Image (cartoon, rainbow, N blue to C red):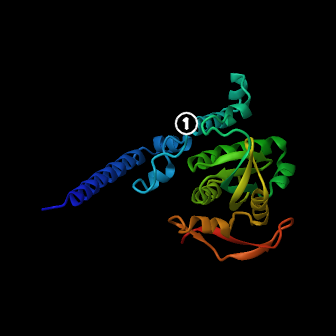
Amino acid sequence: MPSLEGARARGESAIDAIRRRLTQQAADLLNEHPDFARGASEVGLIDRAWLEQPTERPIRTATSLDVIRRFLERSIEQEPSLIANMGLNAIQLLNVDTDDGRTGDARQVATIAFTDLEGFTSFTSREGDRAARELLEQHHRAVGPVIRSRGGRIVKKLGDGLLISFGAPEAAVLAALEIDETNETGLRLRVGLHHGEVELLGDDVIGHDVNLAARVADSAKGGEVLATTDVRSAIGTPPAGVTFGRARRRTFKGVDGSVLVCPVRRAG
């Protein structure tokens, strides 16, 4: 006579199989409507990682506040005059934090990315300020959805570059590659990535690991995504279709000792 434990285990296995099948069907249905799926993942209603691996990843990790923030960021990116028309302060609107109960500053582990458009200064000198502004607006409209869909947050815009924070190193790597692939400015993009602990200062991130990410970006070549081996170690097995190149040692101004960095590329 079958044991009660065995029957329970079979029942749980059957339920799990049904759940996985329904989850896959839901993801397949959404993927049949790419515009809807893209919009939903960009604002965090569903996770893009779940769309790609529905039986392995949670359907959503963004908080309600994250969804609101991402929606507002997208709206303002598409219509910069929105904030002025609403009569609201953009920084206050996008960085109100009531969901996690955090008061004051804190530290957290994050993957930090810096981007930079190579040759932007020369472009501005040659084409003029208005053309430079239009190029940056085009660039931000292109990369913003990619960053948000991977759960990233644009901490600040630094001239022609961006400081971006990601909660997951895998998401940071995928976003960095996609940002480079969607770059249609005519200027080569370089991206530097580092994984470590950062200090949260209001809506900003500071600390040694942030500075190191900036140094890595400065040393990258145009069209290159360069990461420290801390990023590679934090990920473990690289995402499908992604490969880390041979690590090499670099020394950076203001950083003690040498740092191992490696290029990140699409496999094949």
Amino acid carrying mark 1 in the image:
Ser
Residue 255 at x, y percent in the picture = 83, 66
Instruction: Please state if 77 lies on the left or on the right of 48 as rendered.
Output: right
**Residue 65: which quarter of the image?**
top right
Residue lying at the far left in this picture: please name it.
1
Q: Give how far across and how far down residue 157 sits, in percent.
A: 76, 46
In the image, 75: left or right of 48? right
- Residue placed most toward the observer, 210 or 245: 210
Q: Residue at x 70, y 33 (%)?
A: 80
- Pick the front one: 166 or 226: 166
Q: Residue 49: image x %, image y %? A: 49, 53
Please determine whether, in this image, residue 104 is positioned above or below residue 245: above
Name the image quarter holding residue 222.
Answer: bottom right
- Residue drawn at x 75%, y 76% as measured from the top left: 249
- Label 1 CA crowd tier, 10 Å (few <14, some 14–19, many 20+): few
Circle 1 residue: 64
Q: Residue at x 86, y 66 (%)?
A: 253
Q: Quadrant of the N terminus?
A: bottom left
Q: Is residue 101 above or below residue 158?
A: above
Q: Position of residue 95 (x, y in %)?
A: 69, 36
The C terminus sits in image quarter: bottom right
Closest to the observer, 201 or 218: 201
